[in-house]
Image: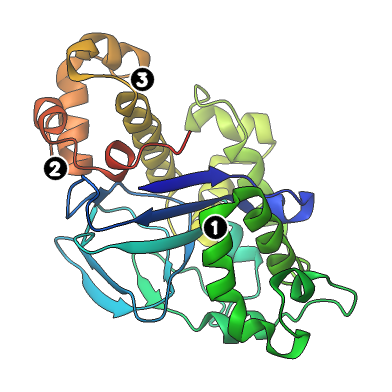
């Protein structure tokens, strides 16, 4: 398995994109054929070969398709089919970033996966005439959109920095059209607050009412502030656990470290969030963060 994660290089792109990530698996790789994705407040644009299939399952949702696709923010656990070799190049947007970007339809999508024609998407935001993207991809400017996907996937296997630079150039014309408003700015400031700041204190620090903050979160992210906090807490918890062997985990210490009142509270939280108790989770280790790591 070849995998990496890297932040954007361009500062404007980094305002809306958290990171780029890459996974390439081959037939003989060890791993779980059906890994799980924990809930995520971020949207992902996933670039793949057009013939490559994808399959996402949850208790209430099932979708299959081929090629590149949107993985919009979601508050459920997805099970994926990774039984066949695959190549995935992901663009992970910041929480709420898609609200500010010029997407059609111009609504905040949640809990949905949608196939996307990448060429048509980026055709709406052509590069500047002096862009060196086409030259770097070794194709003409007129035809670079048709060839860029395969070229990006190939570069991703060889040089993550070069791939990030190409993605920056591809995204820059798009993010340059972004329009932030008072709601997106408020959400961005709230997300930047330390995790120990509780919801009831956020309004005071941001000089607004809690009701205003809640409305802005729902408008920008499609989720409530409480949902976003819970999802981010789970992500931090699973990332922490993925770095430790089972016999190194003290669940009482974990409960205290992540702000749970006691170990039973942690058990109820995990059972509700991912359908597993701490013991069941430690036994299976079937989440993407455990299988592919954090690409560090």
What SS does tag 2 mark? loop
Find disc 3 in the rendering and name its residue.
Answer: 258
Badge 3 crowding class, 10 Å Cα cut-off, few under 14, some 14 to 19, many 20 or more, is: some
User: In which quarter of the view is residue 288 placed?
Assistant: top left
At 29% from the left and 19% from the top, the residue drawn is 244
- Marks 2 and 3, Cα distance to the nearest angstrom? 19 Å
Image spot of residue 294 (x, y percent):
42, 37
Q: Nearer the viewer, residue 190 or 167?
A: 167
Image spot of residue 19 (x, y percent):
58, 48
At 44% from the left and 47% from the top, the residue drawn is 3
- Residue 215 visible at all: no
At 36% from the left and 57% from the top, the residue drawn is 74
- The numbered mark, 1 or 2, whose residue comes first in the sequence reads 1
Check residue 156 in the rendering and tell me which mark sits there, or answer none.
1
Q: Is residue 166 above or below residue 19?
A: below
Front disc: 1 or 3? 1
Badge 2 crowding class, 10 Å Cα cut-off, few under 14, some 14 to 19, many 20 or more, is: few
Front disc: 1 or 2? 1
- The numbered mark, 2 or 3, whose residue comes first in the sequence reads 3
């Amino acid at each position: 398995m070849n995998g990496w994660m890297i932040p954007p290089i361009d500062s404007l792109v980094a305002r809306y994109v958290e990171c780029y990530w890459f996974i390439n698996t081959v037939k003989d790789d060890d791993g779980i054929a059906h890994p799980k994705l924990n809930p995520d407040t971020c949207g992902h644009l996933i670039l793949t070969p057009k013939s490559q299939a994808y399959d996402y399952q949850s208790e209430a949702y099932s979708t299959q398709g081929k090629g590149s696709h949107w993985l919009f923010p979601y508050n459920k656990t997805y099970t994926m089919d990774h039984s066949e070799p695959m190549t995935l190049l992901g663009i992970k947007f910041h929480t709420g970033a898609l609200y500010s970007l010029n997407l059609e339809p111009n609504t905040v999508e949640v809990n949905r996966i949608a196939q996307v024609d990448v060429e048509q998407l980026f055709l709406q935001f052509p590069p500047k005439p002096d862009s060196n993207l086409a030259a770097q991809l070794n194709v003409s400017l007129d035809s670079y959109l048709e060839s860029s996907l395969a070229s990006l996937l190939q570069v991703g296997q060889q040089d993550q920095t070069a791939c990030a630079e190409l993605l920056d150039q591809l995204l820059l014309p798009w993010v340059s059209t972004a329009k932030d408003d008072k709601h997106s700015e408020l959400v961005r400031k709230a997300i930047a607050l330390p995790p120990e700041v509780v919801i009831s204190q956020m309004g005071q620090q941001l000089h607004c009412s809690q009701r205003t903050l809640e409305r802005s979160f729902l408008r920008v992210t499609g989720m409530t502030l409480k949902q976003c906090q819970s999802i981010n807490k789970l992500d931090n918890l699973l990332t922490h656990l993925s770095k430790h062997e089972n016999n190194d985990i003290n669940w009482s210490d974990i409960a205290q470290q992540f702000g749970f009142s006691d170990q039973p509270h942690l058990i109820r939280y995990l059972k509700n969030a991912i359908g597993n108790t701490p013991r069941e989770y430690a036994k299976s280790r079937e989440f993407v963060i455990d299988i592919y790591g954090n690409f560090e």
